[in-house]
């Protein structure tokens, strides 16, 4: 990044030794992106039978038209987005004052702009707290049906801190400096960020390759509020008071503190406490312990909704990472959470929940073998929080990995194991100059059956399996196999990225809606060629299949996508990505004897990044 510096004071006389940068002075920098998205999709699957109900809040969700690897909708439309963040810093004697402004706009398909471009700056991002883009869930049949034009400019944040970076106070939109993700993880992105290809949702690999000049996009949404950070030596502390994404007429507030002691090779130790509460209108959720419980019987099982308001959640945790012996790593994470809400069916039934994670890793040359144990109670960190808009993401009942209650996000990281699960996870990693290999096996079981009685208890959540009638509860089982292998040559990389998820829950012979017996193999193969440090091309193919039975519905569908792209540095301060995809879905319908989900389409994305 090139930084323009305006000198306000005269430079000191030359001396034999280098001198520190003079103060006061003013630094100005800008960064942003210009993105063009053109997507064309056709076939019966672009108008799913569940579409109208899903757009109006029904939990009975469609299986198409979506990209199964990211969950993002593949609806026809053309969109253009231009957005920039301009940051200025005034360096006074001993202090730095900073401010950031966001300016940008979009035109065309709001669905494609919100789900297929670079993460939008906060004043345009409807997934967060912005209300500027007129978006709603739609299933257009041709381009132009969800178009809008929006422009916005806003102050995004300001800060003051010590010149030596020993402390800083920020206000506005910001990302956390430190946080243990089992206590609090910022809301993850729901869009498919432009890249050179696809990867499995639970990949063990490092992600798609990119050139050095390409700036990676953030993986989560920023917070809005105030934040203070202080550190001295290996000790650091962060205090936060912020708002989280929420629907219109509701608010979610977070207050949090964390303390970290980082002793380098000795280890890292931390404690953290987060408290959250909601205010405003009741929200309709796919949980069962709120008021106005409703069970939606259908071919996808017993889907359910209820209304919640005035939620309150406290999460505390402690973490220790250390080396008990030479060549060994040990990790222990312990959390406890308390939850309650004002609108619930059975007041007084809330109960604290625990989180436990223990890991032991052995280094053997270039290899690392890791054994982990996870326990995630059904009442740990189960506050129900929607994004700023109802999300249009792939969420048919048997989709895997299951999205956290479809259009909502969870306060902690559930990417390995979700609520109401316990079990073991084994990983083996090999990294050498020419061969990279990562393998894993996970085996987890439900802790408590998700019966109507259990799910009515305040704060009880299961991350995936659906409701069972009282007296017929059974224990479900998750297993996962993963393998990533890459062969690195001087100018080429060949990669195999594979994951297979197994879900099983036996059922009473008289309860066919409780049956779960599915497996979901996912494979991505790719070839990357490095023409130089500034030019890279990638091509490959991804296949995602789901096979088995869910409730009374036979499941057998295949989503495939071929992709190719180039990434190049076009100047000192600019880089360009051009990506093309051809995708198709075929298989059995989501409703027995209903219309098939068949669809096919093409996506073309151009992403230019600029930094000055």
Image (cartoon, grey):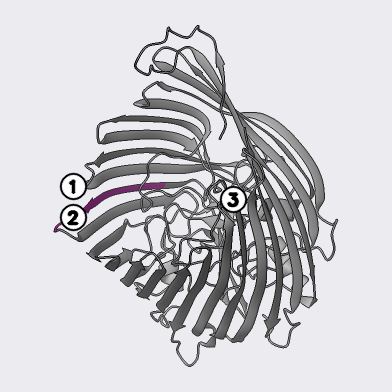
Q: Quadrant of residue 8?
A: top right
Q: Which residue is mark 2?
A: 323
Relative side of 172 to 79, left or right: left
Q: Nearer the viewer, residue 611 or 279?
A: 611
Of the numbered discs 1 and 2, the one sitting upstream in the chain is: 1
Relative side of 379 to 243, left or right: left
Q: Residue furthest front?
A: 16
Of the numbered discs 1 and 3, the one sitting upstream in the chain is: 1
Q: Nearer the viewer, residue 283 or 44?
A: 44
In the image, which residues are magenta? 313-325
Gap between marks 3 and 2 measured at Cα:
39 Å
Within the magenta stretch, is there residue 311? no
Q: Which residue is mark 1?
A: 266
Asked if labels 2 and 1 touch by Cβ distance under 8 angstroms, the answer is: yes
* Image quarter in which the N terminus is found: top right
Seen at 60% across and 85% down, the residue is 555
- Vertical comparison of 309 with 582: above or below: above
């Amino acid at each position: 990044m090139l930084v323009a510096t305006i000198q306000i004071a005269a430079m000191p006389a030359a001396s034999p030794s280098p001198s520190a940068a003079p103060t006061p002075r003013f630094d100005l920098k800008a960064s942003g992106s210009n993105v063009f998205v053109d997507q064309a999709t056709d076939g019966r699957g672009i108008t799913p039978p569940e579409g109208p109900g899903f757009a109006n809040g029904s939990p009975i969700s469609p299986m198409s038209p979506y990209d199964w690897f990211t969950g993002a909708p593949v609806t026809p439309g053309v969109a253009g987005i231009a957005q920039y963040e301009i940051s200025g810093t005034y360096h006074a004697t001993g202090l730095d004052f900073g401010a950031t402004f966001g300016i940008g706009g979009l035109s065309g398909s709001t669905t494609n702009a919100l789900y297929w471009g670079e993460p939008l700056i906060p004043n345009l991002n409807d997934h967060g707290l912005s209300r500027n883009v007129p978006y709603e869930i739609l299933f257009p049949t041709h381009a132009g049906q969800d178009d809008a034009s929006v422009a916005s400019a806003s102050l995004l944040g300001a800060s003051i801190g010590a010149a030596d970076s020993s402390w800083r106070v920020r206000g506005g939109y910001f990302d956390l400096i430190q946080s243990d993700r089992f206590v609090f993880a910022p809301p993850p992105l729901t869009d498919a960020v432009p890249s050179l290809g696809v990867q499995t949702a639970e990949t063990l690999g490092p992600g798609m390759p990119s050139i050095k000049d390409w700036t990676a996009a953030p993986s989560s949404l920023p917070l809005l509020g105030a934040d203070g950070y202080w550190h001295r030596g290996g000790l650091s502390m962060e205090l936060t008071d912020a708002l989280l994404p929420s629907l219109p007429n509701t608010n979610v507030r977070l207050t949090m503190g964390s303390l970290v002691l980082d002793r380098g090779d000795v280890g890292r130790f931390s404690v953290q406490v987060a408290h959250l509460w909601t205010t405003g209108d009741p929200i309709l959720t796919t949980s069962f312990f709120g008021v106005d419980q409703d069970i939606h019987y259908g071919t996808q099982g017993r889907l359910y909704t209820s209304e919640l308001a005035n939620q309150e959640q406290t999460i505390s945790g402690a973490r220790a990472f250390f080396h008990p012996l030479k060549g060994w790593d040990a990790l222990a994470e312990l959390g406890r959470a308390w939850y309650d809400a004002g609108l619930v069916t059975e007041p007084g039934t809330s109960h604290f929940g625990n989180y436990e994670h223990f890991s032991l890793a052995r280094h053997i040359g270039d290899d690392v073998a890791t054994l982990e144990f996870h326990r995630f109670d059904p009442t740990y960190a189960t506050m129900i929080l929607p994004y700023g808009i109802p999300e249009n993401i792939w969420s048919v009942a048997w989709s895997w990995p299951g999205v956290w209650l479809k259009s909502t996000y969870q306060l902690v990281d559930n990417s390995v194991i979700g609520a109401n699960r316990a079990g073991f996870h084994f990983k083996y990693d090999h990294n050498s100059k020419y061969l990279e290999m990562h393998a894993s096996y996970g085996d987890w079981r439900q802790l408590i059956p998700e019966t109507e009685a259990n799910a009515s208890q305040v704060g009880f959540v299961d991350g995936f399996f659906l409701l069972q009638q009282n007296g017929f509860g059974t224990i479900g089982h998750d297993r996962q196999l993963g393998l990533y292998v890459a062969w690195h040559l001087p100018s080429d990389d060949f990669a195999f990225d594979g994951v297979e998820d197994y879900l099983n829950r036996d059922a009473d012979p008289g309860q066919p809606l409780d049956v779960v017996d599915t497996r979901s193999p996912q494979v991505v193969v790719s070839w990357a060629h490095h023409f130089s440090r500034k030019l890279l091309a990638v091509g490959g193919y991804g296949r995602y299949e789901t096979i088995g039975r869910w409730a009374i519905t036979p499941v057998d569908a295949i989503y495939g996508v071929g992709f190719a792209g180039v990434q190049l540095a076009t100047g000192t301060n600019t880089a360009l990505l051009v990506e093309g995809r051809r995708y198709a879905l075929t298989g059995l319908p989501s409703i027995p004897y209903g219309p098939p989900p068949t669809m096919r389409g093409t996506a073309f994305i151009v992403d230019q990044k600029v930094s000055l």
